[in-house]
Amino acid sequence: MKTKVYIGIRWKFLAVFIGCIALTLLFVLLGWLLASYWIVYRPYNVPIRWVINHIGSQTTAVVLGVSFFVFLYIAATRSFVRNAKELAAVLEDMASGRLHASADVKTADELGTIAGNINSLSEQIHSYLEEIHHGLTEIAKGHFDYQIPVRENHELGRIADSINAMSEQLNRSIQEERNAEKTKNDLITGVSHDLRTPLTTILGFLEIIDKDRYTDEVELRYYMNIAYEKSLTLKKLIDDLFEYTRINNGMPLHLQELDVGGFFQQLAEEFVPSLEKAGMTLQIHAPEQPVTVRADGDHLVRAYENLISNAIKYGSSGKYIDIYIAQEDGHVSMRICNDGEPIPKQDLPYIFERFYRIEKSRSKATGGTGLGLAITKSIIEVHGGQISVESSTKQTVFETRLPAAVPSPI
């Protein structure tokens, strides 16, 4: 289309140019014939003879021919130039920001085609800008799920797409902020409840002791023992809460290469008394070649202590705890498996949430704070890893994946 219009304009100007030349030659020829006719008649021939004698017939013919050609060319292209100027003014208006400007050129020639295209473009841009403006108004009202229509192969479509992406990101940020606020409130509620319960018990027994409402020393020691146990529970909750907060607020990591097999061998030795008491055996299945990760050993100890402790507490009806170590796809997989009572399916999606406890007598008896698995998950994630859990009547499996250590160049 653009090529046809350009060629049509060139041919039109060429036709006008040739036509003007032809008419100019005809004008010069007619002038020469008339001059030849009038030169023999007095007194009409006096000016003609004067011109011929003082200026020259050829010079006169050239001057008159050029003047006539210029007049004809200007007259023939006047409307075309006027329409072109109008189109230029419209384009200047659009360039200055008045994108709804329109051209009032209704000729059937190429300029009419250009004018129609400009008007169509102006209307298209204006209507699309109205859609974008409406979308921005809706977003400004808080309707972040509003989507501006995206026209393909359109420059403004890229802007609309960017606005939609910005709106989605803003919506996600607001939802995350709301979730963070809810999380903070839930945290305060959970901490208040878990701190108040043992503290109330401690204060109750201390009040009995303070007012000498016990019968003998045996009863006194009994009350003191309960208060002491509750104080330990309170201390553990505060320690776990401090650890969880410290991890999630960006704790510093002292990374170094860690042999995963050796790490679990040392960790297993610490649990020998607990394993013997529970009548369980811990087995480590590791490749012959060393498997290493870059991690902070002190923090990983805390994470896997929680997992092994839980395996002993809740898998005591089984006999074995198996730890499988494998390296695959640039990651090191560590699976801690135990037999025993499975975790209910309805609890699995929430098992890593803070203060979440499975509402069974076993969880109450163990005296957990509900922060152990949340701390473990946070430690694994700050190391760039992942943790998941599966549980069935056969076994419960906690799997962690950490990035494998990149071998140092020799």
Image (tube, rainbow, N blue to C red):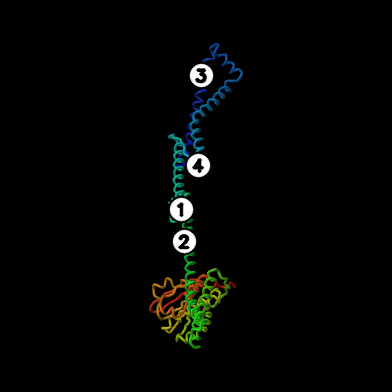
CA distance for labels 2 and 3: 94 Å
CA distance for labels 2 and 1: 16 Å
Label 4 neighbour load within 10 Å: few <14, some 14-19, many 20+:
some
- Residue name at image x 54 percent, y 68 percent: 249
Residue named by callout 1? 141
Q: Nearer the viewer, residue 97 or 327?
A: 97
Q: Amino acid at mark 4?
A: Arg
Residue named by callout 3? 33
Q: Amino acid at mark 1?
A: Lys
Q: Where 166 sits versus 36, above or below?
A: below
Mark 3 or 4: in front is: 4
Q: Is residue 148 visible?
A: yes
Q: Amino acid at mark 2?
A: Gln
Q: Nearer the viewer, residue 223 or 359?
A: 223
Q: Amino acid at mark 3?
A: Leu
Mark 2 or mark 1: whose residue is earlier in sequence:
1
Number of the label disc, if any, that sits on residue 98: 4
Image location of residue 282, percent across then percent down: 47, 83
Mark 3 or mark 1: whose residue is earlier in sequence:
3
Mark 4 or 1: in front is: 1
Q: Nearer the viewer, residue 11 or 212?
A: 212
Image location of residue 271, percent across then percent down: 50, 83
Label 3 neighbour load within 10 Å: few <14, some 14-19, many 20+:
few
CA distance for labels 3 and 4: 58 Å
